[in-house]
Image (cartoon, grey):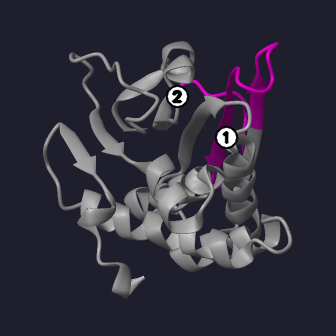
Amino acid sequence: MKQNHYEARFAGVGGQGVILAGKILAYGMVNYEECQALQTPTYTAQVRGGPTKVDVVIDKKHIEYPRTENIDFFLSLHQKAFDLYFTDLKDDAIVVIDPNLTQHIPKDIPQQVFVVDLVEIAKKEMGNPLYAMVLAVGFFAGVTKLIKNKNVQKSVIDNAPKGTEVENLKAVRIGFALAKEALKRKEDLVRLTLKDIDKNKL
C-alpha cells in the first residue's frame, strides 16, 4: 500500500452483496497487506431493497477515527444509494457507477467517473447479479493498486460462501481486467463493458 490512509465506500441496496465487498477488502488489507482496516456497514430501515453502504477505512499504521471523512473511492450499484451516499468525496476521488440502476449523475462533479456494467457482466458471466460486488472489489484493486491482485483473490477465497469460490474468482479477475482498461482512459467519463476486455487472458 503506497498511501498511508485511504477511504472507500461501496453502496447499493440490500441484497446486492455490498457488505461482502467491504468484508473482502478489509480482511485482505489486514491479513495480507499488513495494514489496519475497519469496515462500517450502514442499513436503512428497509433492509432488502433499501439503500445500504459499507465504508472501509484503511491505514498503514493506526486508524484514529473509524468513520469516513474524505472518501478516495466511491462505487454505486443503485440510484437510491448514489443519491443518499454520494457525500464527503475528495475532488480527485475515483467514482464508479453501474448504469443499469444508477442513471442520473450530476454533470458538474469534479471526479473522473467510470461507468461499468457490473450487474450485467455478473449475470452474463457468472449467472447471478450478486457477483457484481465481487467484480467491484476486483476493479477497486486494479484501479487503485492499494491491494495486490493475488491478495484480493486470497481474501475472496477466505470469505466467499462455500461452493462459490470458482465463480467469485472469475468475477474478481474480470474486475482486474476492467480496471486495467480503465487506467488507459483519460476522459472525465469512461464507459466500460465486457467487450472492452480479452476474456482469454483472465
**C-alpha span from label 1 to label 2:** 9 Å
Q: Quadrant of residue 184 in the image? A: bottom left
Place of residue 107 in the rendered image (x, y in percent of width and height, measured from the top left): 22, 18
For the C terminus, the quadrant is: bottom left
Name which residue lies at 56% across and 52% down: 132
Residue under circle 1? Answer: 16
* Residue 52 lies within the magenta run: yes
Residue 148 visible: no
The local secondary structure at tag 1 comes to: loop
* Neighbourhood count class around disc 2 (C-alpha, 10 Å): few under 14, some 14–19, many 20 upward: many
Name which residue lies at 60% across and 50% down: 129
Q: Nearer the viewer, residue 93 or 107?
A: 107
Q: Nearer the viewer, residue 97 or 94?
A: 97
Place of residue 173 in the rendered image (x, y in percent of width and height, measured from the top left): 49, 73
Is the Cβ of the residue at disc 1 closer than 8 Å to that at disc 2?
yes
Residue situated furthest left in the rendering: 187
Q: Is residue 117 above or below residue 98?
A: below
The amino acid at mark 1 is: Gln
Which mark is on residue 78?
2
The local secondary structure at tag 2 comes to: loop
Residue situated furthest bottom in the rendering: 200
Q: Is residue 197 above or below residue 193?
A: below
Question: Which residues make up the magenta segment?
Answer: 40-69
Place of residue 154 in the rendered image (x, y in percent of width and height, measured from the top left): 70, 77
Name which residue lies at 52% across and 35% down: 77
Mark 1 or 2, nearer chain start: 1
Q: Nearer the viewer, residue 119 or 180?
A: 119
Q: Is residue 153 left or right of residue 79?
A: right
Q: Is residue 111 left or right of residue 28?
A: left
Q: Quadrant of residue 42 in the image? A: top right
